[in-house]
Amino acid sequence: MKMKTLGATAIEISAIGLGCMSFGRAMGACSETESHATLDATWGAGINFLDVANIYGPRISEEVMGTWLASRKHQPVIATKAGIQRDKNRPVNNDPAHLEAELDGSLKRLGVESVDLFYIHRHEQAIPIEDVAGFMGGLIAKGKIKGWGMSEVSPTTLRKAHAVTPVSAVQNEYSLWTRQPELGLIQDCARLGVTFVAFSPLARGVFGRTIIDPDSPEFGPFRAEMPRFHAGNWDHNREIAKAFHTLAHAHSVTAPALALAWTMAQGEHIVPIPGTRSVDHLNDWVRADEITITEDLAAKIDALLPVGWAWGDRYSEAQSSTAERYC
């Protein structure tokens, strides 16, 4: 597995990371044994960048990671997040006392003294991002975190925050069917030396081994809310996805591997973090960093999946209420 540097830190991370949301059973049942087996295979493949959050489960993904770390004694690069809370009156909380208390809980569950990367899971608009950045600098000084980042933010928020305390990473949804970050965020990350972490790079399962089925029990309520999977949109989106799968097979690679290779080809600072709870599915894309996107292949992909090809919003109104919009 190729390696990259996390932002301006000296921390080396794998070119592909692992998103661990599914360990929190967000996409269906998942036992600790299954999660540990996936983590073992991930580590064996050279992937050392592992992404969890306190809200996944809640707390389950961190607890699973903690028991795995305790039993294996590996030292991966761990990223976790705080800021989203299950409170309809205040769904995002960036208050320093809250963030530090949540971080302390994460450290306990993970069984570590510090984490390599700590994100605010969303930006609470009532609290200036400059204040958040200053507080994060204090956590770095305390030794509780080695770097900090933000999720689902705009280029403006990045620039303001980075001017106070250098940002190590920004994590936003990015894939062949969600390309909003190309409207300035990816470019600003490159200019500032910030790693851009692409979550859901396999388009919520559209570019998985098989195209996700909305009628499957594993589809889950979270995806069910997304307009792109609704009647009137999904038939169109599924047909385009089928054509992409056909293109991948024509080039002797899997659809998920090709989707990840395309994502990485959009910038040296881009690190995708596909999620899975299956060793079998992990093997479908774990060598995606070895695929070269030639000019000819890039042109074929662009012709098949031009910017804006997917019908429907990526999030429902409720889901998008805490993500920053900038276009």
Image (cartoon, helix red, strand yellow):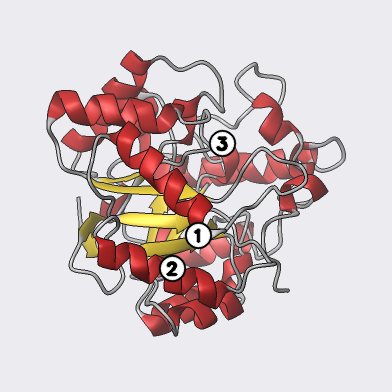
Q: Relative to residue 189, is residue 177 depicted above or below?
A: above
Left or right of 228? Residue 271 is: left
Q: Earlier in the sequence, mark 2 or mark 3?
A: 2
The image position of residue 233, as x and y in percent, is: 81, 43
The image position of residue 211, as x and y in percent, is: 59, 32
Find disc 1 in the rendering and name its residue.
96
Find disc 3 in the rendering and name its residue.
205
Q: Relative to residue 197, is residue 278 depicted above or below?
A: above
Q: Nearer the viewer, residue 48 or 242?
A: 48
Q: Which of marks 1 and 3 is nearer the N terminus?
A: 1
- Give the residue type that dot 2 points to: Phe
- Give the residue type that dot 3 points to: Gly
Judging from the image, what secondary structure is the residue with disc 1 in?
Answer: helix
Q: Residue furthest right?
A: 232
The C terminus appears in which quarter of the rendering? Answer: bottom right
Judging from the image, what secondary structure is the residue with disc 2 in?
Answer: helix
Q: Relative to residue 8, is residue 55 depicted above or below?
A: above
The image position of residue 173, as x and y in percent, is: 56, 55
Q: Relative to residue 266, is residue 107 depicted above or below?
A: above
Q: What is the crowding at mark 2: few (fewer than 14 residues within 10 Å), some, or many (at least 20)?
A: some
Q: Which of 37 and 240 is in front in this view?
A: 37
Q: What is the crowding at mark 3: few (fewer than 14 residues within 10 Å), some, or many (at least 20)?
A: some
Q: What is the crowding at mark 1: few (fewer than 14 residues within 10 Å), some, or many (at least 20)?
A: some
The Cα–Cα distance between marks 2 and 3, rounded to whole angstroms, is: 36 Å
* Residue 261 visible from this viewpoint: no
Left or right of 12? Residue 281 is: right
Q: Which of marks 2 and 1 is nearer the N terminus?
A: 1
Find disc 2 in the rendering and name its residue.
135
